[in-house]
């Protein structure tokens, strides 16, 4: 009798488990259970066209068991539940448990500092960027922060972004044949766009000039006409938390704040807050300032880790988000920022939860490194989303169950399965890459073998890894928290 009861309970449990599994499958698709490995089938029709089957993240919805067709020119020609009828014998990459996202876009980095590893945090915080740049106001100057423009160092830095799923960056310097460098005509890698204008010192204040009540900075500040003539103008604004930092915005958003010129030029306010403008950092901006940014349809690049590590404070992201300002995420640089967008997202996730009480959704953060990132550089007509007619800059991520936006936002290099730029494979797991683009170089990524496929074989990946080892450069990835990673904590 007892045996019969046990058997009955077991059968009921099995039935409930089966029902639960079917519900999870209906809700989450194939990513709810054990991961199904990718498979590929070489086509015998249209040459160099690729049909990808995966969980597809489009700007407005998640398409589970979706399909994306990429033509031989690297353009997306179909997005939906089925593109098979249009594929005409295309090569098929079937990854039912993987998430297909636009490639990540890093809208702010100083990649010529990528050879400087972060140091242990000293606890010193600054009020203005010139304090750590120049040792002003009794602060310690970070004198060993010197750029290294060796092309091999730059390439190693771009690899750090690539292994995390990035396809484009704005980085002040560039390495050919890896990411798109959106601020260089030669780095656009075939993208039919104008390069971004990138200004670190739009007030011509590199000498360490700080003002509070006027605009007496350098003689060659950015002007309204310069910004208006650009396709996208990205510039450091109000990087700091004091009145000197906020004064910068006054001199860049008004024509009347200071009308007395300096001998030799400059000295007056220039109002260049307009749709072409994107403000980098903007830490000191007030609610009123952010309202003006929103009214003028300008954008902002948010770099929370570097802001918190240097100033103990970051942009009023709640107000910026509430006002509908287009927001992108940038890693800033290795010394005080994040080594890649994955770690910058990790900081944003932590800050959002610990300080902002989850006011931002995973989808909001995902947009900051995809469609909204493309928008602040004014290339959203070409990249940043999976849509018909867009360039196929794509990244495939392990799903790991649950919300697919969350999986991308919390991704690590270990969960990046494939990266394509313009439909061409740049990077990925060996089993996928070897089946679709054999002969690529091998890179050690935190103990995992990955394939890297730069165009024309340059840079040579084996030689680059040997160089990085010899120079003791900061690794391309870590299995856990990166060594001496700058803090991501709010401090007064």
Image (cartoon, helix red, strand yellow):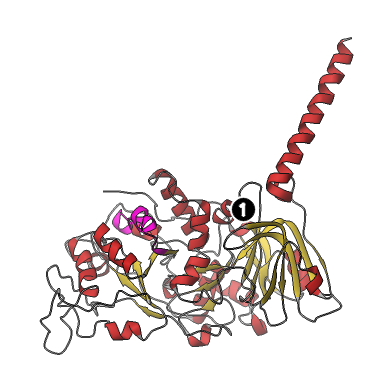
Q: Is residue 446 above or below residue 78?
A: above
| Pick the front one: 454 or 188 | 188
Q: Quadrant of the N terminus?
A: top right
Q: Which residue reaches farthest bottom? A: 264
Q: Is residue 393 above or below residue 456?
A: above
Is 14 rendered above or below residue 402? above
Quadrant hosting residue 255: bottom left
Q: Does the image show residue 305?
A: yes
Asked whether the viewer can see residue 437, the reply is no
- Residue 333: x, y in percent? 42, 67
Side of 321 relative to 476 (left or right): left
Please state the horizontal and vertical placement of residue 461, each as a whole percent of the image: 63, 75
- Toward the viewer: 264 or 386? 386
Q: Residue at x 57, y 51 (%)?
A: 406
Bounds of the magenta segment? 308-326
Q: Residue at x 67, y 79 (%)?
A: 74
In the image, taking residue 162 as reference, residue 305 lies left or right, namely left
Image location (x, y in percent) of residue 70: 71, 74
Residue 314 highlighted magenta (yes or no)? yes
Residue at 23 percent across and 85 percent down: it is 220
Q: Is residue 342 left or right of residue 432?
A: left
- Nearer-the-camera pick, 362 or 156: 362
- Front-most of 97 and 166? 97
How busy is the neighbourhood of tag 1: few (under 14 within 10 Å), some, or many (20 plus)? many
| Residue labelled with disc 1 | 404
Residue 476 image offset from top left, x and y in percent: 55, 65
């Amino acid at each position: 009798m007892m045996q019969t009861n046990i058997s009955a309970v077991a059968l009921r449990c099995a039935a409930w488990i089966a029902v639960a599994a079917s519900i999870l499958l209906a809700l989450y698709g194939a990513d709810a259970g054990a991961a199904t490995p990718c498979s590929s089938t070489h086509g015998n029709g249209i040459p160099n066209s690729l049909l990808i089957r995966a969980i597809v993240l489009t700007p407005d919805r998640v398409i589970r068991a979706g399909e994306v067709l990429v033509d031989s020119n690297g353009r997306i020609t179909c997005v939906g539940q089925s593109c098979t009828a249009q594929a005409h014998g295309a090569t098929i990459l079937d990854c039912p448990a993987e998430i297909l996202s636009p490639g990540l876009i890093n809208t702010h980095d100083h990649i010529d500092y990528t050879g400087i590893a972060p140091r242990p945090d000293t606890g010193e915080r600054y009020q203005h960027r010139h304090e750590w740049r120049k040792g002003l106001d009794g602060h310690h100057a970070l004198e060993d922060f010197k750029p290294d423009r060796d092309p091999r160092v730059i390439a190693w830095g771009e690899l750090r972004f690539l292994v995390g799923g990035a396809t484009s960056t704005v980085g002040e310097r560039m390495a050919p044949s890896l990411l798109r460098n959106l601020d260089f005509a030669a780095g656009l890698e075939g993208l039919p766009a104008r390069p971004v204008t990138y200004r670190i010192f739009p007030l011509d204040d590199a000498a360490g000039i700080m003002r509070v009540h006027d605009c007496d900075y350098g003689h060659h500040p950015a002007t309204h006409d310069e910004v208006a003539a650009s396709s996208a103008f990205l510039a450091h604004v109000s990087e700091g938390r004091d009145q000197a930092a906020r004064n910068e915005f006054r001199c860049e958003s008004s024509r009347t704040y200071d009308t007395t010129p300096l001998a030799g030029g400059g000295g007056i306010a220039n109002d260049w807050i307009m749709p072409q403008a994107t403000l980098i950092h903007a830490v000191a901006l007030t609610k009123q300032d952010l309202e003006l940014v929103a009214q003028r349809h300008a954008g902002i690049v948010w770099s929370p880790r570097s802001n918190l590590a240097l100033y103990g404070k970051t942009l009023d992201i709640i107000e910026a988000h509430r006002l509908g300002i287009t927001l992108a995420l940038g890693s800033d640089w290795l010394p005080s920022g994040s080594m890649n967008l994955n770690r910058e997202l990790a900081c944003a996730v932590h800050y959002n939860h610990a300080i902002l009480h989850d006011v931002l959704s995973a989808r909001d953060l995902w947009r900051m490194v995809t469609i909204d990132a493309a928008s602040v550089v004014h290339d959203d007509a070409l990249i940043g989303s999976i849509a018909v007619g867009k360039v196929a800059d794509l990244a495939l991520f392990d799903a790991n169950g649950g919300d697919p936006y969350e999986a991308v936002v919390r991704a690590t290099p270990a969960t990046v399965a494939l990266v394509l730029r313009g439909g061409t494979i740049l990077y990925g797991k060996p089993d996928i890459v070897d089946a679709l683009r054999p002969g690529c170089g091998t890179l050690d990524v935190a103990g995992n073998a990955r394939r890297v496929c730069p165009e024309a074989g340059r840079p040579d990946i084996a030689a680059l890894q040997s160089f990085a080892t010899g120079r003791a450069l900061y690794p391309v990835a870590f299995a856990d928290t990166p060594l001496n990673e700058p803090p991501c904590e709010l401090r007064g």
